Amino acid sequence: MNKPDPLRTAQEQGRIRDLVERGLRRRYRAERRFRAYGLAAAVSGLLFVGFLFLSIISTGYTAFVQSYIQIDIRFDAELIDPEGKQVEEILRMGDYSGVFKAALREKFPQVEGRRELRQLYGLISDGSAFDLRDMVLDDPRLIGQTRELWLMASDDIDQLVKGKIDRKLPEDQRVVSDLQLGWLDALTAEDRVERRFNRVFFTAGDSREPEQAGVLGAVVGSFLTLAVTLLLSFPIGVAAAIYLEEFAPANRFTDMIEVNINNLAAVPSIVFGLLGLAVFIKFFGVPRSAPLVGGLVLTLMTLPTIIIASRAAIKAVPPSIREAALGMGASQVQVVAHHVLPLAMPGMLTGAIIGMARALGESAPLLMIGMVAFIADIPGSLTDPATVLPVQVFLWADSPERAFLERTSGAIMVLLVFLLVMNAAAVILRQKFERRW
Amino acid sequence: MAVESKTQSRSAALETATAAAGGSEPTARRTVGDVSVPNPVMTCRQVNVHYGDKHAIRDVSLDVAHNEVIAMIGPSGCGKSTLLRCLNRLNDTIPTAVVTGTITLDGQDIYERRQDVVQLRARVGMVFQKPNPFPKSVYENVAYGPRIHGLAADRTELDEIVQTSLQRAGLWDEVKDRLDQPGTALSGGQQQRLCIARTIAVGPEVILMDEPCSALDPIATARIEDLIDELRQNYAICIVTHSMQQAARVSQRTAYFHLGDLIEVGSTDMIFTNPKHRLTEGYITGRFG
């Protein structure tokens, strides 16, 4: 009955030790290999992100400065207010480009001929006329006086100053002519060329002229659109998740809803754009190109993400807390409102922020509802035509002017900062709601 | 080999015991001992619980008397926790659970349509196996019940309820200086007493305890057991426990469950010194379970 235990003999024990020892080396090797793979994956991921940032920042940082040219401007009454009435309507109609063109002619009196003059006028941005007009409207006493003013350089000159145009290229391959080069060098020698912080980039809407184009219109558009998205998708998503998790009876109908929600999360975003076009614009008559309709479309797109994340967060609330509350005689709504919701809030916020980040970066569905239009004005309300940052990036990337290249990268940086601020806010909110149990 | 044979003999003993006690019969066994008490606070009559296809409790009848501690013992899966959860209708949250039979509280059927489950749970409190204070302050934990049931007219009254409850739960002296700290920061035994304080804050008539000490160390367990004994002055207490010593220490009556049947009920002294049924005897002498 008591036969010797095969696992007990000294011989067997030695053999087992040997086997384990041989296996050990292989196990450790596999472990090291696995760790190396993980490390390689993390490092390559980091490298890609680093490369992305490097390329964007290196092309884009120059968008935040702008070249200015100093020139003596005489506010000629002949050009601005020939009848001397000093009425605003007339001052508004004045020939302000004539003013700076005259100043340029004065600066370089030897220039003659239409073609050469056109090149000379090309040094200064056309937009300077508006700046001069605003100055006169602010203070009509300027008329007749002469002032030393810094005017915005045109985009090509700006690019040259920033070294983005190669001076050594033959003239016919370069957007800046030899004559312009000479004038610019002369101005530089007199310290009349300066690079300054590009205020216009942050305070203006879109423009066909790169030096007058800014991201504010797109930033405000993005903000309004996301505000609509957040205000609609978060409450609806959380309410849907709570209903499905806590109250819905388990039957085929709720199963079907669940499957559909999961499928919706995988639908290409442009389809949501088409849906928005058909439903919101065609059927409900919401104005197109507006942040309102953009927000509605992005809400449709974000909802599944928020619902799925919120349901997971609700599921993660420990059943003991639920039982404790039920055992105390809390009704089901009280259990949800007092216990489940506060504990699930961090998870729900995470879901919301993932959804919002996706919505912020989305351009395809917005193309379908007209937010791709050229809009120079900064939107003031939810129904004004607007565009959003990613669409602005798309529009500028599509423009032929060289100066839009750096502005595209600049806009991407603004988009990234927008995203960073949003995520930081979410992290802070999360920490505020986080509780232990 | 020796170990093996012992295991064999134990399971064999269980089988023969089961067979001897009535074996394969579909109907429930007759409970040994008197299930009824004079002037009960709660009564169960022919209670059956099904979880889907599983018949978890079969024809169980049992009374709970005023100011007594009744212990429910038995091997895992015997239905004692299920019965406990019927008494405050916490089984309602399990969609597949079907409860038949009659359970009354002060003569009123608690499964009747008119019975409001919120009110029932205010009258029949529950303490769970794992201490589960809310992730709120000590004060808020105790004040939660009175708040949702609207028991306190103002803050002073609420303060009073909180203090009395904590005092009754024997926790006041330990936490009076840190009422605003999270309840989850207390030690395991303190957390469990906090849960008891939370339960008695709504003035229940019956307190159900589902293995309240199984997650606690012996010292904390001893404190809870003392507390249970004190609470008996004011409440009826049903306690489910896996520790026979605990049942013997705290309870006046003991009910032994086996595979969904209530096998034997009697005074704790009788059950532990002179069990009538072979299954009961087998369980309390440690031959199986």
Image (cartoon, coloured by chain):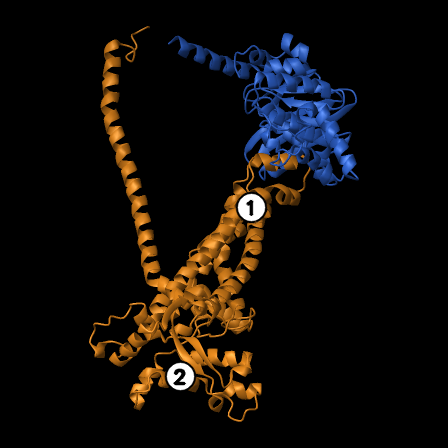
Chain colours: A orange, B blue
On the question of residue A308 being in view, the answer is no
**Which residue is nearer to you in this view: A285 or A64?**
A64
Specify the subunit that label 2 lies on: A
Query: Residue A345 has which mark?
Result: 1
Most foreground residue, B46 or A289: A289
Query: For the residues tagged 2 and 1, is the chain the same?
Result: yes
B253 relative position to A289: left or right: right
In this rendering, the label closer to the viewer, 2 or 1:
2
Query: Left or right of B136: which side holds A288?
Result: left
Q: How many marks?
A: 2
Type of residue at label 2? Ala
Q: Amino acid at mark 1?
A: Met
Q: Looking at this view, is A256 or B193 the one in front?
A: B193
Residue in the image at 46% along x and 79% along y: A147
Furthest-bottom residue in this view: A83
Residue B135 horizontal/vertical position (percent): 60, 36
Is disc 1 surrounded by few (<14), some (14 to 19) or many (20+) residues within 10 Å? many
> Could you tell me which secondary element the residue under label 1 belongs to?
helix
Q: Chain of mark 1?
A: A
Query: Which residue reaches farthest top?
Result: A2
Local packing at callout 2 (Cα closer than 10 Å; few below 14, some 14-19, many 20+) is some
Can residue A27 be seen here? The reply is yes
Mark 2 falls on what kind of element?
Answer: helix
Residue beneath label 2, please? A103
Q: Which mark is residue A35?
A: none
Q: Position of residue A155 (x, y in %)?
A: 35, 74
Say which of A40 and B86 sits in front: A40
| Residue B257 placement (x, y as % from top left) | 60, 20
Task: Judge whether A213 appears above or below A83 on screen.
Answer: above
Where residue A31 sits in the image (x, y, percent)?
28, 32
